């Protein structure tokens, strides 16, 4: 070797290869199977890990530099937000319901994603995907932390934020997101990447983050919209990782195609069920609305999805199995979920309310074929009850779907007057589902889904044995954080403080 | 209507989140480190067992022989969460960037005596592969360890190891272009001096107890390797022989070791003080690994210094490591 040779100029790709791909070596003292014990059991065949195309080429020094710049800006803004009582700039305190739901469900999911990517960043037998997944892992802990830090200031003034850690593990609706991520993490490394990297980050992420972040921007929440913007370039990297991993699997061996197809079918459905909560948020929880769930779905679901699956068709991949059912449900789910949340509002750590007259006009306009016909009468009934001094509550416990863990409150795809309900018997036990999609997911892996922890049945078991008050305490469901918005401390305080700071 | 939100003074309802109040009371506003670290991991009602190892829980403290009543006792004295971590590293990389520029603009590499460059090539460049193993090992601890305050610094440590491997690669490219990296890999794969270390790292990559991996990688191996290679061989021997340029380009490694060993020591101290059983397990791991890695590193040191001096340097590093272990409450 010629020391002191003048270095040639290397192109970025070659340089990155040397800086990462070239670090690994082929073990010779131990068998690869001992080092990577989980890489085979899902049946995905990889013949050549070096065919992995790096989705982005960031060496650590560049990573530290870019990310630190973003961090500096981010914390400067949320510090100012806290100092200047920025929380009083939100449209009104109804908006807070959206970010309570976010902190209770999505921030824990960011954390789970951090741990999951660390695991697959260790389990893949190729250094390309290892490093890409590790970078996503460290990004995801960033997201969890910046979100907690942004919400920390809201927690100082409002109910429903302070118990998010306990609620993550114990509340019935948080188990929707929790079980989704637990499902992905308990799957093998390849399925995890299809679940989170591809289906969630690539196919569905725009339906989650765009609504929340633009909702925040429209409603004066600088803190939330700042973390959204700050995470955007991370998300762009994650999306390219998601796309690369599916292409890699499909190109490695034709036997992988049916396995990947099965996972796409499953995770698309799981993801769409999770997004019904976002649908309710968009159509009902934002005092100033961005767009309807239907409009968001048309852009980010249909347009993007069609383009993507057209592209994947050359590998023999078909659009997700239950795509049509999702499409048929779009004009219904937000109303169904919100009516559900409203009638079980004694058991939610956020407030809900009946739509106002102008809300109703908006909903009619956005959902001309469904809202007035199917859902307005139910809202009118709830409003009438309130006007008569009553309250529209359902203290009966909802039957939860064994797969998605949402209450079984959805209707038949082709008949919005019929509640959908499916049952499967497995080893002598009956299991309930909200839909064909969820039943199908269960039936592919019943031994997995029978293990699901369902929060409602646990209320009936030891040690609570049906004691609703004890259950609410156990789940940190404080009356001040629950129930009708109109009667809430949050509303009263917000209006009082806003008056203090307002001058005509 | 005008709003002037800055002037108003309104009373806070909650000083902090409930899980932090339980741990730290609510006299003091919790730090951002505390908010970012405590109780973030799902704790109960885990839904499904891993299909990759159905005997395990999704987050499973029993993957380790070490037992903690509360894994959140293992806090990081540096209080690194993502933001403080990246800000620190960004500053360090800025320094390193200007170090690389200085070395380049002053032609320090070209002016360096050949024996110094030979040591840099033979000893330092192959180490980038060892850093890759450390990256994998820390990623495992982050993935499978228990409790965020313990696992979080491990993802940072993993990425740091990748960063170090990349700094070493740049050094290699400077001293001998792509051929430097190729020759170093050849050495790593085949030369006698490196085989014991490569074999030991392949062995360590088969270990699945996250704390055992943490101890053997971050405390024992790094605790021998960094004092030996960077503090003694590079910063003393090579500098004396006209190799300051090398020392400038490994400044990150030297500082990083000093910084991160505070964290590693504190984790060990807390684990050891938890129970006699923990102490016994830690002592067994450390004792056997320290003896093993000392002998593994002897031929590596021999690449830079003569045999008897190599013995001396390695046993100094071994003593230093045992001192650290004693300070952490072990071997008493
Ligand atoms: Fe994220
Ligand atoms: Fe379902």
Image (cartoon, grey):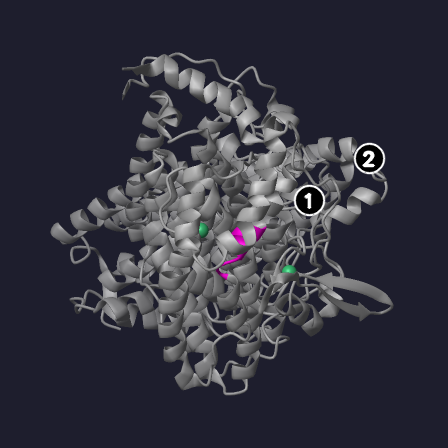
Left or right: B221 as drawn, with respect to B188 = right
Pointer 1 residue Cβ closer than 8 Å to ligand 1: no
Read off the residue under disc 1: B282
Q: Which residues are magenta?
A: A330-336
Left or right: B295 as drawn, with respect to A51 = right
- The part of the image, by quadrant, that contains residue A166 is top right
- The part of the image, by quadrant, that contains residue B283 is top right
Quadrant assignment for the C terminus of chain A: top left
Q: Position of residue A183 (x, y in %)?
A: 63, 60
Q: Is residue A413 above or below residue B162?
A: below
Read off the residue under disc 2: A467
Quadrant assignment for the N terminus of chain A: bottom left
Q: Which mark is residue B73?
A: none
Q: Position of residue A21 (x, y in %)?
A: 38, 69
Q: Secondary structure at mark 2?
A: loop
Q: Chain of mark 1?
A: B
Left or right: B21 as drawn, with respect to A232 = right
Q: Is residue A112 visible?
A: no
Q: Chain of mark 2?
A: A
């Amino acid at each position: 070797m010629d020391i002191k040779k003048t270095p040639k100029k290397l192109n970025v790709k070659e340089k990155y290869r040397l800086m990462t791909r070239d670090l690994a070596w082929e073990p010779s003292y131990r068998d690869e199977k001992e080092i990577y014990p989980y890489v085979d059991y899902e049946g995905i065949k990889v013949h050549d890990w070096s065919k992995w195309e790096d989705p982005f080429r960031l060496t650590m020094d560049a990573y530290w530099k870019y990310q630190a710049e973003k961090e500096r800006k981010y914390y400067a803004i949320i510090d100012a937000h806290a100092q200047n009582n920025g929380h009083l700039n939100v449209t009104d305190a109804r908006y807070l319901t959206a970010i309570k739901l976010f902190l209770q469900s999505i921030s824990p999911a960011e954390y789970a994603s951090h741990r999951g990517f660390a695991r697959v960043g260790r389990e893949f037998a190729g250094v390309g995907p290892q490093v890409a997944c590790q970078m996503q892992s460290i990004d995801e802990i960033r997201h969890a932390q910046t979100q907690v830090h942004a919400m920390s200031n809201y927690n100082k003034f409002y109910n429903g934020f302070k118990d998010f850690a306990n609620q993550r593990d114990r509340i019935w609706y948080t188990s929707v997101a929790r079980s989704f991520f637990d499902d992905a993490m308990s799957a093998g490394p390849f399925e995890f990447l299809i679940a989170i990297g591809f289906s969630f980050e690539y196919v569905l992420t725009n339906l989650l983050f765009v609504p929340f972040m633009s909702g925040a921007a429209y409603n004066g929440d600088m803190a939330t919209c700042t973390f959204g913007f700050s995470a955007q370039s991370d998300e762009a990297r994650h999306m390219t990782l998601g796309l690369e991993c599916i292409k890699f699997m499909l190109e490695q061996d034709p036997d992988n195609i049916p396995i990947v197809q099965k996972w796409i079918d499953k995770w698309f459905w799981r993801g769409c069920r999770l997004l019904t909560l976002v649908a309710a948020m968009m159509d009902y929880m934002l005092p100033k609305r961005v767009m309807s769930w239907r409009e968001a779905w048309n852009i980010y679901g249909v347009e993007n999805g069609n383009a993507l699956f057209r592209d994947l068709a050359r590998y023999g991949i078909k659009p997700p199995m239950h795509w049509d059912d999702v499409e048929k449900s779009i004009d219904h789910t937000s109303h169904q979920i919100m009516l559900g949340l409203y009638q079980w509002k004694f058991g939610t750590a956020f407030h809900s309310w009946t739509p106002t007259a102008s809300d109703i006009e908006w909903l009619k306009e956005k959902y001309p074929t469904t809202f007035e016909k199917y859902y307005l009468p139910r809202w009118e009934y709830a409003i009438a009850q309130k006007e008569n001094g009553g309250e529209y509550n359902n203290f009966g416990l909802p039957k939860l779907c064994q797969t998605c863990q949402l209450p079984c409150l959805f209707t038949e795809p082709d008949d919005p007057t019929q509640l959908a309900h499916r049952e499967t018997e497995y080893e002598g036990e009956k299991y309930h589902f909200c839909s064909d999609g969820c039943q199908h997911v269960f039936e592919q892996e019943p031994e997995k889904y029978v293990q699901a922890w369902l929060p409602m049945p646990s209320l009936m078991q030891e040690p609570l044995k049906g004691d609703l008050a004890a259950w609410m305490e156990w789940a940190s469901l404080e009356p001040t954080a629950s129930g009708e918005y109109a009667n809430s401390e949050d509303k009263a305080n917000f209006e009082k403080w806003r008056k203090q700071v307002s001058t005509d | 209507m005008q709003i002037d939100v800055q002037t108003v003074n309104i009373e806070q309802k909650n000083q902090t989140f409930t899980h932090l109040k339980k741990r730290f009371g609510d006299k003091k506003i919790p730090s951002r480190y505390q908010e970012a670290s405590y109780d973030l991991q799902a704790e109960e009602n885990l839904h499904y067992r891993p299909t990759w190892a159905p005997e395990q829980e999704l987050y499973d403290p029993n993957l380790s022989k070490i037992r903690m009543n509360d894994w959140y006792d293992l806090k990081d004295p540096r209080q690194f969460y993502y933001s403080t971590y990246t800000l620190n590293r960004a500053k360090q990389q800025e320094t390193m960037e200007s170090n690389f520029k200085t070395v380049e603009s002053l032609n320090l590499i070209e002016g360096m005596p050949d024996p110094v460059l030979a040591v840099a090539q033979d000893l330092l460049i192959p180490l980038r592969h060892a850093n890759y193993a450390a990256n994998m090992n820390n990623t495992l601890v982050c993935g499978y360890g228990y409790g965020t305050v313990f696992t979080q610094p491990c993802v940072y440590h993993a990425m740091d190891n990748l960063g170090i491997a990349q700094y070493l690669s740049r050094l290699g490219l400077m001293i001998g272009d792509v051929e430097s990296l190729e020759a170093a890999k050849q050495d790593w794969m085949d030369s006698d001096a490196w085989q014991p270390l490569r074999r030991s790292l392949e062995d360590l990559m088969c270990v699945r107890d996250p704390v055992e991996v943490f101890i053997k990688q971050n405390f024992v191996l790094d605790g021998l390797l960094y004092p030996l290679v960077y503090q003694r061989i590079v910063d003393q021997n090579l500098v004396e022989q006209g190799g300051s340029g090398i020392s400038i380009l490994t400044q990150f490694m030297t500082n990083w070791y000093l910084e991160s060993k505070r964290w590693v020591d504190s984790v060990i101290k807390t684990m050891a003080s938890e129970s006699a059983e923990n102490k016994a397990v830690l002592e067994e791991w450390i004792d056997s690994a320290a003896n093993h890695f000392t002998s593994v590193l002897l031929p590596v040191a021999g690449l830079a210094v003569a045999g008897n001096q190599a013995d001396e340097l390695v046993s100094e590093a071994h003593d230093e490591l045992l001192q650290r272990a004693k300070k952490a409450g072990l071997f008493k």
